[in-house]
Amino acid sequence: MKLHATGRRQFLGMASIASLLGNLMPTRTLARGSGKNVSTRKHDSSAEIYTRLGVHPVINAIGTVTVLGGVIMPPEVVAAMEQAGRHFVPMPELLEKSGEHIARLLGVEAAVVTTGAAGAITLATAACVTGKDSQKIQQLPDTRGMRNEVVMQKSHRSGYEAQMLLVGTKIIEVETRSELESAITDRTAMLFFMNKAEPDGKIRRDEWIALGKKHKIPTFNDAAADLPPKSHLSDYCRMGFDLVAFSGGKGLLGPQCSGLLLGRKDLVDAARINASPFGGIGRGMKVGKEEIIGLIAALERYLKVDHEAEFRELDARVSDIAKALSGIRGVKAERFVPEIANHLPHLVVDWDSPVTLSSQEVAASLRDGEPRIEVSQRGPRGLTISVWMLRPGEHNIVALRLGEVLGRPPKA
């Protein structure tokens, strides 16, 4: 089995490692690279909060995806949220003051806490359509008489377009610079850019920003999962994007229902007054006082983390799994670090004869076994393994179970 780095990019938006969190003891632990089962798991009583409802926790080898609940928050984040829940505060004041604090931490012009990156998309769109005009804010999603078109590259479609459409806008797709120039009119409210799709489009970040400034149209960058490095929290604003969104429940290890909208003060202020508790289109995007304080705690923690040490830990986990699979005929494992977003070590596992199982069958075996393991399918005979959200010892469990499934003799 060959182990090497590649520059592959495609993977679900994810996060930084949670290597020291949680109480789960490994079900089975492997001696590094040996493939030997050397211990058994102690009962984790905390899981009963879910099992009493008939829901059984999983080992998360996909990453910080919403479908698995995002992340396990660090103790200091949980503690901050618990403290926040003991008091009442004026929410408009908290939104404003928390944004000022975050902006100072990151060295950006302005910030506001949102309901995830998806909420940031909607509030950013609303801000670009209405500005601070209270009549326009109350009129949404009826955008008559307003700028109501959002221009984006066709290759940047991601499934999040609904977050813009619910404001009452129309999406205009382009592919080339000349098409973009033609698409910008007096109806254009915002130029939307999907950060992880940058290599797929013909118009790069710097050109997108330049065209926005040329035509005086705000540019928005959805960088939801683009951490680490931590410098990205300010890089895209400094690059010239007017608005930038990050998820709070991915790399920052904050509350799953939180996000950040950063950028130009007039637009961030407009986004904030389009949100709860002010009413209007953002009323349902209600960020609680606990989530706001939790995200601040997560951000303050993240800015102090030794990300190089995290990277080394992830590399070791990837190497351990690869070594454990190295004796299985037909199986190949490769380390890769995505080019944009999720810029940390991952493992792709591919197989051919004599392994006859499909990726769907292998994923189902892992999901239906004990303990349950969730992985990403990759083509007809392949998986992507994220080690980011695995707790101590869990990468060994993943290696053992993978070896059991892929090493089974073919059915007669």
Image: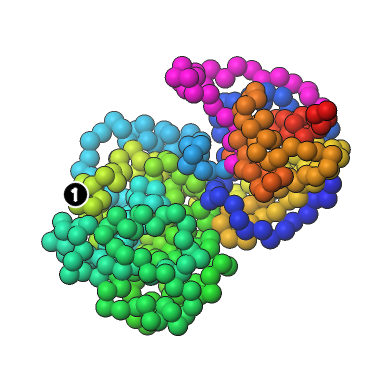
> So how many labels did they put on this image?
1
Q: How is the image coloured?
A: rainbow
Residue 73 seen by the camera: no
Q: Which residue is mark 1?
A: 279
Q: Magenta: predominant secondary structure element?
A: loop
Residue at (48, 74) in percent of width and height: 175
Q: Is residue 27 magenta?
A: no
Q: Assign a secondary structure to mark 1.
A: loop
Instruction: Look at the picture and state if 327 lies above or below 114.
Output: above
Q: Nearer the viewer, residue 394 or 298?
A: 394
Q: Residue furthest front?
A: 412
Q: Nearer the viewer, residue 146 or 214?
A: 146
Residue 88, horizontal then vertical, whole percent: 22, 36
Instruction: Look at the picture and state if 311 lies above or below 268.
Output: above
Residue 200 seen by the camera: yes
Q: Nearer the viewer, residue 148 or 290?
A: 148
The amino acid type found where label 1 is placed reads Gly
**Which residues are the magenta region?**
35-62
- In the image, taking residue 124 as reference, residue 241 lies left or right, namely right
Residue 375, horizontal then vertical, whole percent: 62, 39
Instruction: Look at the picture and state if 25 lies above or below 7.
Output: above
- In the image, taking residue 199 as reference, residue 101 lies left or right, namely left
Residue at (84, 46) in percent of width and height: 1
Q: Quadrant of residue 5?
A: bottom right
Instruction: Look at the picture and state if 170 lies above or below 18.
Output: below
Residue 107, horizontal then vertical, whole percent: 41, 63
Residue at (39, 57) in percent of width and height: 161
10 Å crowding of disc 1: few (<14), some (14-19), many (20+): some
